Amino acid sequence: MALNTLEYAQNLQKALDRKMVEASTSGWMEANAGQVRYNGGREVKVPLMELTGLKDYQRDDGYPAGGVTLSYQTLTMGMDRGTSFRLDEMDVNESNFVANASTVAGEFQRTKVVPEVDAYRYSKIAALAEATQKVYTVDKATVLDALLDDINFVKNLVGETVPLVCSINGIVKSELEKLEAFRKVVAIADFVQGSIHTKINMVNDVPLLPVPSARMKTSYIFADGMAEGEEKGGFEEGPGAKDINWIVMPKKAPIAVSKQDKIKIFDPNTYQHGDCWFIGYRKYHELWVLKNQLGNIRPNIAGQ
C-alpha cells in the first residue's frame, strides 16, 4: 500500500499543536516559552540570559567591560499523558483516513485534552502563589470592588505599565455582567492567542479571560488508568478542592509548554492486534512560574 503514514502523523501533529494554543483558555501562556528547545520526550531547554550590571565610568579607561552569558536550563515536564484510538478498516479506507483521523483527534483534543491542560495550569498557579492568595466569598454587592482591589494589588507590585491578565471563573464573570457598576467601567479590547483574535472585556486596562468553572479549582485528580473506576481516564475535582474566583497575574509570569510527542500511526497491514488503523496519542505539558514572579500573582479563592 502506497501510504506515507509518517507524513500523515507529522501533519496531524502540527495541526493539533496549533489547535491546542487556539482552543485553550490558557493558550496565551505558551507565548512566554520564548525560545524553548524541544526535541521530543519530556525535557525542554529554556534559555537563560545573565547580564552584568552598571559600573562606574572611568575617565581614563572609558566604558567598563560588561558581559552577557546565555545558557540553557533543562526542565522536565511533569505531565506525561496518552491514549490510543483504533479506526476499523471497514469504516476507513486510505482515501478518507486523514479526514477521519483528524476528526477523532480534533474532537478528543477539544473535549478532553484542552479542559485537562487548562485545569492543571490554573490549579498549579494557585498552588504556587499560595502566599498571596486571597479568600473571598462572591457577593454581588462587593464582587466588583474585590476584583479591582486584586488588580490594584498586583499593579502596585509590578507598576502600571506591565501588562496584566485576569483569568476569571465563568460563573463569577456572569455575576459581574449583571451589575450596572460593571457595565460602566468595562471596556472592549482585542486579545490575541495564537492566530486567533477575539474581543474581550477589560477592567482597569486588564483583560478578563473567562474560564469554564470546572477548570477553575484548586486541586484535581488526573487519572492514571490503573485504579478501579479510572477506565475512562481524564480528570476530576480533588478532595477538598475550592473554586478559584479569578487569578490576576502579569502576562509574562506563567510559562507554559505543551508538546505533542510524535504521533504514531499504523495502517491495518502493519498493526498486528486488529484489522484497523492505530493512532497513538501522547502529550507532554507543564507550567512554571519564575521565582521572581510568584509574589506578583494574586489568586482569589472562594471561601467556605
Image (tube, rainbow, N blue to C red):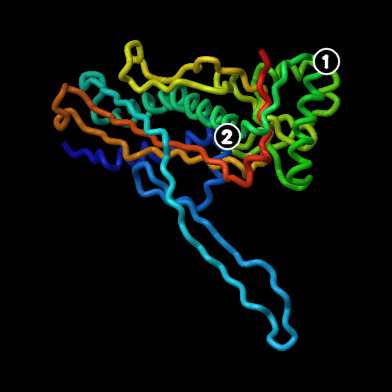
Q: Residue at x 40, y 24 (%)?
A: 108
- The residue at the far top in this view is 229
Please name the amino acid that badge 1 sits on.
Ala
**What secondary structure is found at the residue carrying circle 1?**
loop
Q: How many marks?
A: 2
**What secondary structure is found at the residue carrying circle 2?**
helix
- Assess disc 2: are there few (<14), some (14-19) or many (≥20) residues with their C-alpha within 10 Å of its C-alpha: some
Residue 176 appears left or right of 93: right
Which circle's residue, 2 or 1, is located before the other in the chain?
2
- Asked which quadrant contains residue 125, the reply is top right
Numbered circle sitting on residue 209: none
Q: Is residue 271 above or below residue 292?
A: above
- Assess disc 1: are there few (<14), some (14-19) or many (≥20) residues with their C-alpha within 10 Å of its C-alpha: few
Q: Is residue 101 above or below residue 62?
A: above
Q: Quadrant of the N terminus?
A: top left
Which residue, given by chain and number where applicable, does mark 2 sit on? 128
- Residue 241 spot, x, y in % from top left: 55, 17
Q: Residue at x 50, y 24 (%)?
A: 115
- Residue 27 spot, x, y in % from top left: 55, 36
Real-space CA distance between mark 2 and mark 1, rounded to the nearest whole angstrom: 30 Å
- Residue 86 spot, x, y in % from top left: 26, 23
- Between 138 and 261, the residue placed more toward the observer is 138
Which residue, given by chain and number where applicable, does mark 1 sit on? 141
